[in-house]
Image: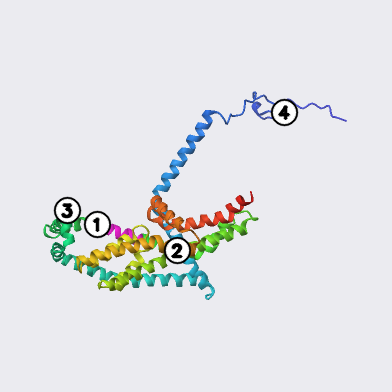
Amino acid sequence: MASNKRVPKNSQSSAPKHLEVGEDFGKKGDPINLQHPFYFGFLATAGALVAIALLQALQSATQVFILIIISLFLAMGLNPAVSSLEFRVPKRGLAVSAVVILVLLIVTLAALLVIPPVLSQVNDLIAGAPQLIDSLRNNKTFQTLDEDYGLIKTLEDKFQDWFTNGALLSGAFGGVLGVGRTVLSGAFSAITVLILTLYFLYSLPSVTKVFYRLAPASRRERVTKIGDAIIARVGSFVGSQILIAFFASIFVFFLGLLLDLPYAAALGTLILFVALIPLVGHFIGGTIVSLVALTQSPTKGLLALLLYTLYVQIENYLITPRVMKRNLAIPGLVTIVAALLGTSLLGLVGGILAVPIAAAILLIMDEVVFPKTDNS
């Protein structure tokens, strides 16, 4: 039976009046119109501002991202050698250390072999500049060029400015600070790339596992196989580039023997490393070889330049497409177009990464895109 006791007024809820249950807060308004031009414009403007801020942040850290990309690329390129050693050593760290130490030893020995002859040739070129100009005057080809374009007169004026009037000395003093900054910056970048490459190379399996876990479990096995294949193709690309550079170094070595150039072995070793640089590698190599030949005679300098240029064309259109097609399974036309586009978009880094990225895209298309289109 219900109680008829009254609740005293002072025992009622002490909650504020505006929080009492059932209080009328007014009529609900219409929901926000997401299609309204003002709302759309606000979101578009906010998104554009965020995108601009992110682009500026990325632009300010471009150098850091370039070092990270180069380090990751080197790690994937050296990974096949590390993987082959893992079957013989108990730990991956030992295999990584062995591969990196071997690479550093090769680079150091090559530098010790190449740098002294290069400095000697530069000094010989400077010391023999007057005799070189006199020999150019006695050459019929250069006499014709001098009559048409004033070539010898221009070289003589430059020589007078650099050595007689002291322009080279003043320029050297003015450029010492710039050279110092360049050397320090290059040394810091090299150390950074070396450290990052060690980290990436040591932790590459664990890093890839983390990224593979982002894929759904039902597709993770397939994503893992495709990802490992992409890393293997990057390693094949590095090996292909070394093979192509080796062919160039052999050509320069025999060219030096044919023209009786000094330090033919050192020139071949130098080209082995210079040819690895996309876009400007052969330009630097051709310049060095031509200058060394020019110290012997103008005819040898011109002949070295012509033969080196001919070899570069053969390499670009015959050797590189065939090697890339065999090791990366990509058509030669795709190799050339990818290298040109990558260099135009991102410069040196783009030229390095363009071909393996093209190989990865073709692999994804063969395994993912084309099966869907064939079954549709």
Residue type, mark 1 in image: Leu
- Earlier in the chain: of badge 4 and badge 3, it is 4
The mark found on residue 12 in the picture is: 4
Residue 294 location (% of width, % of height): 22, 66
Query: Which residue is denoted by mark 3 in the rendering?
Result: 148
Query: Which residue is denoted by mark 2 in the rendering?
Result: 322
Q: CA distance from mark 4 to mark 2?
A: 92 Å
Query: Which residue is denoted by mark 1 in the rendering?
Result: 177
- Earlier in the chain: of badge 2 and badge 3, it is 3
Nearest to viewer (mark 4 / mark 2): 2
Residue type, mark 4 in image: Gln
Q: Which residues are magenta?
A: 175-188
Residue type, mark 3 in image: Asp
Marks 2 and 1: in contact by CB < 8 Å?
no
Any magenta on residue 361?
no
- Asked whether 166 or 92 is in front, the reply is 166
Q: CA distance from mark 1 to mark 3?
A: 40 Å
- Earlier in the chain: of badge 4 and badge 2, it is 4
Taking the image as shown, residue 158 lies to the left or right of residue 46, namely: left
Instruction: Please rate how many residues cluster around mark 4, counting C-alpha atoms within 10 Å: few if below 14, some from 14 to 19, many from 20.
Output: few
Taking the image as shown, residue 34 lies to the left or right of residue 283, namely: right
The mark found on residue 150 in the picture is: none
Nearest to viewer (mark 1 / mark 3): 3
